[in-house]
Amino acid sequence: MAFYPTASLRGKSLAIIVLKFCLCNLYSQEGYGYYSKGDHYYVKALMEKTRSMKKIRPPTYGNLITILSIDGGGVKGIIPGVILSYLESQLQELDGPDSRLADYFDVIAGTSTGGLITAMVTAPNENNRPLYAANEIVPFYFQHSTNIFPQTRGPLAGIIKLFKSLTGPQYNGKFLHKLLRGTLRCTRLHQTLTNVVIPAFDIKHLHPTIFSSYEVTSNPLKDAMLSDICIGTSAAPIFFPAYYFKNTDAQGNESEFNLIDGGVAASNPTLVAISEVTKQVLKENPDLFPIKPLDYGRYLVISIGTGTTKDEQRYNAKMASKWGLLSWSFKGGSPPLVDAFNEASADMVDFHNCVVFEALRSQDNYLRIQNTDAQGNESEFNLIDGGVAASNPTLVAISEVTKQVLKENPDLFPIKPLDYGRYLVISIGTGTTKDEQRYNAKMASKWGLLSWSFKGGSPPLVDAFNEASADMVDFHNCVVFEALRSQDNYLRIQDDTLTGTVSSIDVSTKENLENLVKVGEELLKKPISRVNLDTGRYEPVENGGTNMEGLNKYK
């Protein structure tokens, strides 16, 4: 299934050089180091591909792994649509009008609206070519957005919109569901023309669900219809109903999915895509030989955002200090709580990627395109809970240490970047209610602002974002530490069995505080668990001992 270079495709090296320059010029980023002498080798390797139409396309032996990542953002999917149309047009100038993005990228990842774009450019048509060309993405949004997001008009429109949002989803999603089913028909994940990665979040189990082409051979139950995957990854809380569906494999085994928007887990799916490739390298997938774990010099990553409102500075701490449920859920036509979580998630991914690619001297292989116009001249702080950015701060801590190593801090000599054999990381959670399975898609499909903000004594929206953030960090850490054969240097201690009052963050009665002490004592006695990279579930480590014994090893 590998690709082999042909003489007729040599011009593609020039194509990608043009693209890198033009993409930088498009956002006035000349001089930011996106082009280097080494690019001649890497870019040539990138473009020397044949147009094989196999179901899953590995990179050429010894070649770059090329990754395209597209953020979520509703109608703002038009922004990456413009970028992708430009990119594809440049490829077509040199390689002909039939060239498509799926011919050039080994992995295309997308969240929410980015997941829809991913499906559009990778699902096959009757000729086994991509269903949509990139220049058809923007017209698609113009044609269908008004029906997907129907607007109430008139002097009372704002009040009507708010009232409707309080009691149920702002939009019923019926048109979107019908559109996706009609467009993608019965196409399944394994049929895409290149590998795809689309994250969603399971509201019942409170953990991310990653739909990956790489997984379908080992886990056929993930081989769902693209329409179901796209509806699930687009089911944004407050805006659309949660989405439930079942999938059955050839043996009759059945799996159910209770999904909400993938942006809850990864509004910027770049890190998820990189982790999926790394997992395949760890499994010694022969198609990826001789690429090694974290061999980022062989990755070429283009990550496209859908724009932010950072420069507008529409909120501040003085304003937010007076907000209650309604204001955090709806302010100036937008939900500040969702804005905060989404921007934090995307920024933390970009922050980590920048650190890691620089640590491995591969910063020229990572291009993030996002329209913020930020000047960076900040002198004041308007802060809310750090859990919005990183409910599990382990990755932030590791990145900060890595930055100091890059700065050649003498206190850290002779440690090298990502020398995880010299790291000893203990990460302690505060407990979750995952095992309680207190929510499901059928229940959540009827929720509006009030229910998403308060249900059964807890805010489901905050629960979802917090659990997703913590799990994605742990998932990535497990992948990286295993990739570097240092998994014993990373210990995550977490209790997913909390129920009732002990799961609350603000019940401060003496009885509850004493019960929390008991939870901690019992957690010490539980077996060391680690996330299964295939299932995403936590499983006891064989012969790993208890958490107490694990801590004792580090005396």
Image: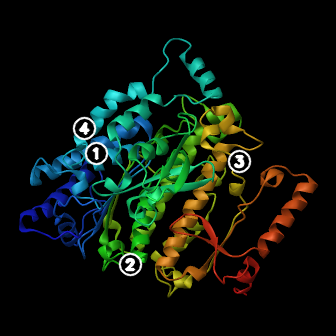
The amino acid sitting under disc 4 is Glu
On residue 83, which mark appears? 1
Q: Residue at x 27, y 69 (%)?
A: 64
Whole-number angstrom distance, CA of label 2 to CA of label 4: 38 Å
Could you say which is closer to the camera, residue 434 or residue 555?
434
State whether residue 94 appears in this view: yes
Q: Residue at x 55, y 71 (%)?
A: 398
Give the number of the mark in front: 4 or 1: 4
Q: Position of residue 435 (x, y in %)?
A: 70, 57
Instruction: Classify residue 259 as left or right of residue 359.
Output: right
Q: Secondary structure at mark 1?
A: helix
Label 4 sits on residue: 136
Q: Residues within 10 Å of mark 4 (few under 14, many from 20)?
A: some
On residue 285, which mark appears? none
Label 2–label 4 contact, CB within 8 A? no
Label 2 sits on residue: 284
Could you say which is closer to the camera, residue 258 or residue 121?
258
Above or below, 448 relative to 154: below
